[in-house]
Image (tube, rainbow, N blue to C red):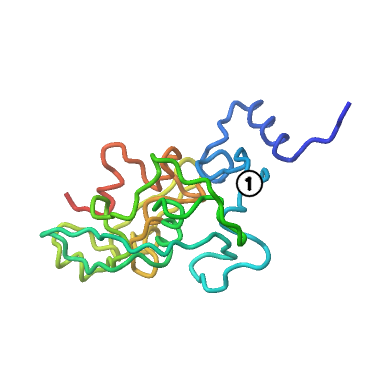
Amino acid sequence: MNCKVTKRAILAGLLLGLGIQSNFAGTITGSAHDFTAKSWSGGRICVACHAPHNTNTSVTDAPLWTHALSTATYTLYSSATLNATMGQPSGLSKLCLSCHDGTVAVDSFGGATGSTMVAASSNVGTALNNDHPIGFTYNSALATADGSLHDPSVKSITIGSGGQTKTGTLKATMLYNDKLECSSCHDVHNTFNAQTSKLLKVSDAGSAICLACHNK
């Protein structure tokens, strides 16, 4: 009898025995970014984005980054009611788009050029004019100019669910260098998520995720 059992098998058995689902807030295991079942991952979760050696030192927004970066130019969101100053995505949002804009293969990492593209349902494309704006500065000045946004330095919000939550101002819990990025709403590591199906930090039930920022 082969007694070699992986840590993942042990964990899965414990969760099954306790009747707990694997995709809960607090761990990437079992979430939409758990790539262990993909043939190109080699059974590893983190490999598509991070590596312990020979990583891209030009990326300062994420540790030990190894995924190929998108070079796409994006069509930006615009509206007559938009008060924010828009620019090409950068920082954390650009890292997300390096899979989700559909121009770079998901398995393009570690210097290799892959061929597996993101699923159509997760492909936002390069035309971002039909998506929520990202990469803009969201501060007290913008809230005042807009008139229907909460002041991010004042408004308190709780992200996550169950025993894995964090409470603080919008600025502290959802903004990055005062900017609204993809990761303002989506926690890619499923650490502080209230809705794991979309990796949302705040549930979309009753439009709660929208009302976190929009004062309606």
Q: Position of residue 212 (x, y in %)?
A: 28, 51
Q: In which quarter of the image is the N terminus?
A: top right
Q: Where is residue 193 in the image (x, y as percent from the top left)?
A: 45, 45
Q: Disc count in the image?
A: 1
Q: Mark 1 points at which residue?
A: 41
**In this picture, residue 121 sits left or right of residue 191:** left
Using the image as rendered, state which of residue 97 and residue 126 is in the foreground.
126
Q: What residue type is labelled 1?
A: Ser
**In this picture, residue 48 sits left or right of residue 193:** right
Reply above or below: 113 against 160: below
Q: Which residue occupies 71% across, 34% down?
A: 9
Q: Where is residue 57 in the image (x, y as percent from the top left)?
A: 57, 73
Q: Which residue occupies 32% across, 67% down?
A: 88
Using the image as rendered, state which of residue 21 and residue 3 is in the foreground.
3
Q: Which residue occupies 69% across, 30% down?
A: 13
Using the image as rendered, state which of residue 119 and residue 12 is in the foreground.
119
